[in-house]
Amino acid sequence: MDFGRRILPKLLCCKSVPSCADIHKKMENQTSISRLAKLDELLRMEQECEAAAYARALGEGCITGRANEADCKYPIAIRGWGYNALNHLIVTVAYDTDGDELENDFEPGSAVSFFYLQGNDSVAAELKYSCFVDSYKEGVLQIQLPGRDALKSLQDFASRTLLGVRVSIDSTSYRVMHESLVAAMRSDNEKFIRLRETLVGNLHPRFRQLPPVLFPWLNDTQNRAVRQVIATMDVAVVHGPPGTGKTTTLVEAIIETLQRETQVMVCAPSNAAVDWISEQLSKRSVNVLRIGNPLKMSDEMLACSYERRYADHPDYPELWQLRQNLRNADHPPSKEKARKMRKRADELEIKINDELFQQARVVSCTLIGSAYHILEHHRFSTLFIDEAAQALEPACWTAILKADRVILCGDHQQLPPTVKCVEATRKGLADTLMQYVVKTKPECVTLLTTQYRMHRDIMEFPSRWFYHGALKAAPEVADRVVHLMDTPLTWVDTINGERKVESGERRGRSGSLSNADEARLVVHTLRDYVDMLGLERVVADGIDFGIISPYRAQVRMIRRLLKMQRFYRRLRGQITVRTVDGFQGQERDVIVISMVRDNEKGEIGFLGDLRRMNVAITRARMKLIVIGNSETLSRHKFYKALFEHFQKRGQVIELPLETQGGTTSP
């Protein structure tokens, strides 16, 4: 089967703007068109910024200083080569992680480039061919090469110099988003125009009057959200704060929609998010057809992939044999016979494709993946976008072009989409479509309010600050604690520590901040807490811990310190140390947050992104420990209020940074 041809996106067709569409006559102005045009301009700014940074890393000799970063590994060593199940040439490369690897961008299917240092070792150059990640595990990458010539070239360079590998710019995604915005502005489809003007224009959303539907296994706001999804004719938003059962609600809304519609599309900004919602639907016996590059899918979803279903179709062996016979150079068929064989092959290909889509109740893919060639002529009554608050708006329009109505699901008070260009961020590229709809069409929004994760005291502050105090803790978690004599909230305050020369925050060569004294305090505070609970009980009960810092350098430092202490060896599988982004969507019994910032000016930099701190705080089920300098942080009103909440609902321990632990149990 020709896997590549079926995976590559096709250019979107752009038609001229209609002059006589009735709906345009009703518009007061072209607010939606101007918004989309502005988005296109900002997207180009982001693309140019990323391209400039990518080129600058090669030319300024700074790339080797980023060894073992999320998007760059240097140096690497070739460990072997072979072929994968799809007969792609694969080279295996290894690199030294020093047991200290953070989150990585080397996802299966990601485009990567090899590079080497030239001359004075200050300037790097890339090898001139594109490669793709086949698989990844810590310390080892398997990379798909374009052919034997590329392998020979790679081996030749490896014999003469050190090599590195880094993630390339995803130019395909930028191209698809640009084309989607143009198509959205120029569409003459009246249903789409109506939807566009409802989402970002002046039209009001419409709702059907339907008999009340009740799902006894859902709570009140979850029921309300499902009813809103069923009733809307244009757009609905399911706003799911941490722990409120967003996925449960979304799955139920999709299944209930399928009682009324033959097929729906489900999208998300990332492959991991698409796989997650697809897996939950598959567990409910929903026939899911997963569209996309098989390299980027989870193992669980491969069986649902278009390629696997295509190859497993009963007519595929005949189609494969016909193609083999047509390619047979030794015994080529006659012109007439070849014509008949090609006609039969085309018929089988159309039949297999049609049957796969006819059988599927849910078609799932990433937002960018909705531009794949095999979806070109498909439209859907309803599009569900999960994790919509993390999706760039231009990517959303790629999928919306195929839908009559849209359901957005997510939480715009958590992590935003990643935008690297500061100017584009300032002008609104990081502001999501969901964020805009929540602000301008509040009648579309249902806020889920019962959370099933956190103790009520942990929940109270983020509820008040981000969700207007609307959240309430379910009875089964409201008073759940790790230890009956423990408090859910502890702030270890370093305000009284005498700031020595080496103390306080320090910026490393990667640009990330660290605080060595605070990192040591984190490690000792955690040990004190485990001692208080009892190591044997912690191991037997499987109590898990998360250590979070907004700064990668601090995460690395804490990981190294943990590995230096024998005490933590038995707990290795129960302690996770990551940045805030690495903890998105996760939770732990106990969370320790290292704030890092410690300066006399009250500068908090990256901590000013309060949505990230919302994520960090709300990962904790039963215990939240914050370690930081209250004087530095309290210059900001958010952290001042957070510190006061700890004083009121928990405990504050003043512990100078030079204290080496073993004296206080939070």
Image (tube, grey):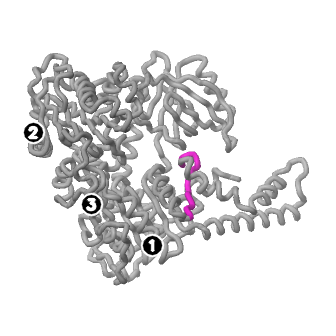
Label number found at residue 635: 2
Q: Residues within 10 Å of mark 2 (few under 14, many from 20)?
A: some
**Nearest to N terminus: mark 2 or mark 3:** 3
Residue at 51% x, 59% y: name it.
Answer: 283
- Determine whether the residue tagged by mark 1 lies in a helix, strand or loop: helix
Residue type of the residue flagged with mark 1: Thr
Is 449 in front, or is 385?
449
Q: Distance between the residues labelled 1 and 2?
A: 49 Å
Say which residue label 1 marks. Answer: 257
Q: Give the range drawn in magenta.
A: 287-297
Q: In percent of the image, x 40 and y 29: which residue is there?
A: 572
Instruction: Pick whichever of labels 1 and 2 is earlier in the sequence.
Output: 1
Residue 357 among magenta residues: no
- Compared across the picture, whether 477 is left or right of 107 comes to left
What residue sits right under mark 3 in the picture? 450
Q: Is 479 above or below relative to 605? A: below
> Residue 435's spot in the image, x, y percent?
28, 59
Q: Residues within 10 Å of mark 3 (few under 14, many from 20)?
A: many
Residue closer to the observer: 19 or 21 = 21
Q: How many labels does the image show?
A: 3
